[in-house]
């Protein structure tokens, strides 16, 4: 551009000639030049502002658009960091103490239909009814054509059924993946495990929730995502459980009983090694609860934990042990056993109106199972102390084992603890408890007087138990119980090799209308073995057994529960690794030890 | 000079663009591999759990008992009995090796002394 001089000579000269001040011309020019410069810089600034504004606008547009996109789009897992591991096992496995699987998950499919997409509902209904015989063709047809847009057809499919449904080939039939609970051992330990079913169901997955037993009690632990990879280890031993179930089932049939229960417990650790209740059920196909009649007759009913029974003479040892603990008697002290005993308007009789009196030693009271003798011992102790002692043994509270059924099986205890209650409770009437309670109490005796709370879970560390009696008294009680087998009511429990100590109990069943049945009994044998140093407690209970092998039907525990329990011990003790004390046969050519 | 800088910058932009393009596809491929592997792992886990369940089912005590009953002729398995416990002292020691007598040495014949007192 051409630069205009500030003082153009021609104008200066003409201004001088006109007598004007030439400086004003310079000022004028300077002003014009500044104006041009200002205009230029203003334009440049405007341009810069525009660019700045535009970049801010674009930046905010990008941020806004990104936010809108994130808000509007479906959330997605970052693919590079997807774990892929948590797809299976939304519920932890359950194993026995040796790691053998008792409950696990299996992938299966559920079948659902979207009738709007269905080509030929009539044919679909017909073919589905062929694949699933439990579905009716008319029902299916009605449900597929009544205008609904979605319906479940089957909750679990086998792979064969799924293939057949595939082959129908209708686009309205769809599969949803499912995880189902599988109990590979079938009926074994069914009552302990309980069962599982589907909770909230969606098309892509469904919750698996525990419905009974341990599965329900420990639902939170089993479903905890942090612990699903780690199986839950139980205290049960599958081999023992199977052996006990087999023997108990045979025994129940031989003794014509309608039900049976057994509890095998390790007294040192409180772990329950086997818990059986018969009749049982298949947890893979859990039957529905009975809608009428006695719920106790349902196979779902757990006789070992839920069933509270008057356990009869098995209670006598508690009265005697307490009297020993208080120093009131010694095992050879003679007590009044003259039957019948009259207390107010009540007459206390012995079994079949025997009279073991007039005097019996305390040890013989247990061996012969004398009601009158026990009653006198209990009266020496007194009702308040008896209550307190039974409370420490756990007879006033539900057992602490890990099953939902255990919480609801509170023992039935008399409110008003009069002297006659003291007497009847001492021989096991007027207080109903479950075989599980009895196992816990007997294990306190067997464990040298220290009660360890029972558990169904494998224990790594044994909790410190509470001492309920001195070691000396516990030893004396075990010796008396050994006497019951040796020369008392449980002589059928004499086994070659294994010494058992135990107490029989025969209790008449109460009628629902009041009073007792004459010919319906609950037989219990509470035992511990080996008798010289007890490690295990076994409770066997038979419901309404009758031994018909003799000339007349026999219903006492000595003839029913005792032989069954003895057979259980004979089968189970070798599995527990207990060395029998056997007189060795004389050495022959094969077994002779070569000396020199 | 300036032209050279422009040229280099332009070449760098082209180069980086090409690199980003390749990386993009490589990443997508890696993601595909990861998701394929993940689903493969899931399938294997599923198969593993099915096989574990199958194993437990086939080894259930009821079935083993039936099998041992069916095959009693060959296996002769019975439940464990108390009589099957042995003692360590019942196990025979191997007979000690008796050294052969030296055939060159004179041998005392028993009964000889009695004949020749």
Image (spheres, rainbow, N blue to C red):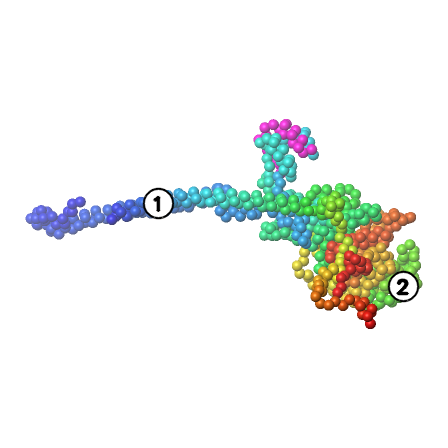
Position of residue A452 relative to residue A131, above or below, is below
Considering depth in this image, is A428 or A7 the residue closer to the camera? A428
What segment is highlighted magenta in the picture?
A110-133
Check disc 1 and report the residue beneath it.
Answer: B15
The quarter in which the N terminus of chain A is drawn is: top left
Q: Chain ID for label 1?
A: B
Numbered tag placed on residue A344 in the rendering: none
**Residue A421 appears at what percent x and percent y?**
84, 58
The quarter in which the C terminus of chain A is drawn is: bottom right
Q: Name the residue rendered at 39%, 43% in the picture.
A: B21
Check disc 2 and report the residue beneath it.
Answer: A360
**Which corner quadrant of the image does residue A370 belong to?**
bottom right
**Residue A507 appears at what percent x and percent y?**
84, 53
* Structural distance between the alpha carbons of marks 2 and 1: 109 Å
Report the residue that reaches farthest toward the front. Answer: B116
Residue A115 visible (yes or no)? no
Position of residue A220 relative to residue A381, above or below, is above
Secondary structure beneath label 2: strand
Report the residue that reaches farthest toward the bottom. Answer: B117
């Amino acid at each position: 551009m051409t630069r205009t001089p500030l003082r153009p000579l021609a104008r200066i000269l003409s201004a001088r000639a006109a007598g004007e001040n030439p400086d004003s011309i310079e000022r004028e020019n300077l002003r014009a030049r500044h104006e041009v410069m200002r205009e230029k810089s203003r334009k440049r600034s405007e341009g810069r502002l525009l660019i700045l504004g535009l970049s801010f606008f674009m930046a905010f547009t990008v941020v806004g658009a990104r936010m809108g996109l994130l808000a509007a789009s479906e959330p997605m897992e970052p693919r590079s960091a997807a774990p892929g591991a948590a797809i299976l096992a939304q519920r932890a496995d359950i194993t026995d103490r040796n790691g053998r699987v008792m409950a696990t998950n299996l992938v299966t499919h559920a079948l659902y239909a979207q009738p709007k997409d269905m080509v030929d509902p009539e044919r679909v209904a017909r073919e589905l009814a062929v694949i699933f015989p439990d579905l009716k063709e008319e029902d299916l047809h009605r449900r597929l054509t009544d205008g609904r847009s979605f319906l479940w057809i089957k909750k679990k499919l086998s792979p064969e059924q799924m293939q057949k449904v595939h082959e129908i080939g209708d686009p309205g039939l769809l599969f949803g993946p499912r995880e189902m609970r599988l109990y590979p051992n079938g009926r074994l330990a069914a009552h302990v495990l309980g069962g599982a079913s589907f909770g909230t169901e969606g098309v892509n997955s469904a919750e698996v929730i525990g419905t009974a037993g341990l599965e329900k009690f420990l639902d939170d632990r089993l479903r905890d995502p942090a612990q699903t990879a780690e199986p839950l280890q139980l205290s049960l031993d599958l081999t023992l459980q199977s052996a006990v179930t087999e023997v108990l089932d045979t025994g129940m049939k031989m003794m014509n009983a309608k039900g049976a229960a057994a509890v095998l417990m390790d007294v040192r650790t409180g772990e329950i090694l086997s818990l059986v209740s018969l009749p049982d059920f298949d947890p893979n196909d859990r039957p529905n609860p009975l809608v009428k009649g006695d719920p106790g007759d349902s196979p779902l009913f757990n006789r070992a934990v839920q069933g509270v029974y008057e356990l009869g003479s098995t209670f006598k040892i508690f009265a005697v042990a307490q009297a020993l603990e208080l120093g009131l008697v010694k095992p050879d002290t003679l007590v009044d056993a003259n039957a019948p005993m009259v207390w107010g308007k009540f007459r206390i009789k012995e079994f079949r109106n025997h009279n073991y009196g007039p005097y019996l030693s305390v040890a013989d009271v247990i061996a012969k199972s004398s009601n009158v003798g026990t009653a006198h011992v209990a009266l020496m102790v007194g009702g308040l102390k008896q209550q307190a002692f039974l409370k420490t043994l756990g007879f006033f509270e539900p057992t602490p084992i890990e099953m939902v059924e255990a919480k609801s099986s509170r023992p039935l205890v008399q409110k008003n603890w009069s002297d006659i209650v003291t007497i009847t409770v001492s021989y096991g009437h007027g207080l109903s408890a479950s075989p599980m309670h009895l196992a816990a109490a007997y294990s306190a005796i067997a464990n040298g007087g220290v009660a360890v709370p029972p558990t169904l879970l494998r224990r790594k560390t044994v909790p410190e138990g509470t001492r309920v009696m001195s070691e000396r008294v516990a030893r004396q009680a075990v010796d008396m119980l050994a006497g019951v087998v040796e020369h008392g009511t449980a002589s059928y429990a004499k086994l070659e090799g294994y010494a058992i100590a135990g107490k029989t109990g025969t209790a008449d069943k109460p009628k629902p209308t009041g009073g007792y049945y004459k010919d319906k009994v609950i037989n219990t044998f509470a035992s511990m073995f080996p008798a010289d140093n007890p490690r295990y407690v076994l409770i066997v209970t038979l419901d309404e057994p009758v031994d018909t092998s003799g000339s007349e039907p026999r219903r006492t525990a000595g003839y029913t529960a005792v032989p069954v329990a003895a057979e259980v011990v004979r089968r189970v003790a070798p599995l527990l690794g207990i060395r029998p004390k056997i007189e060795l046969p004389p050495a022959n050519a094969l077994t002779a030890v070569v000396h020199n | 000079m300036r032209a050279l800088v422009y040229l280099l910058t332009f070449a760098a932009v082209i180069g980086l663009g090409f690199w980003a393009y390749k990386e993009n596809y490589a990443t997508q491929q890696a993601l595909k591999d990861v998701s394929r592997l993940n689903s493969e792992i899931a399938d294997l886990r599923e198969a593993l759990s099915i096989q574990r369940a199958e194993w437990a089912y086939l080894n259930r005590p009821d079935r083993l008992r039936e099998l041992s009953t069916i095959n009693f002729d060959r296996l002769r398995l019975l439940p464990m009995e108390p009589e099957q416990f042995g003692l360590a002292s019942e196990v025979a020691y191997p007979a000690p090796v008796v050294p052969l007598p030296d055939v060159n040495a004179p041998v005392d014949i028993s009964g000889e002394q009695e004949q020749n007192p």
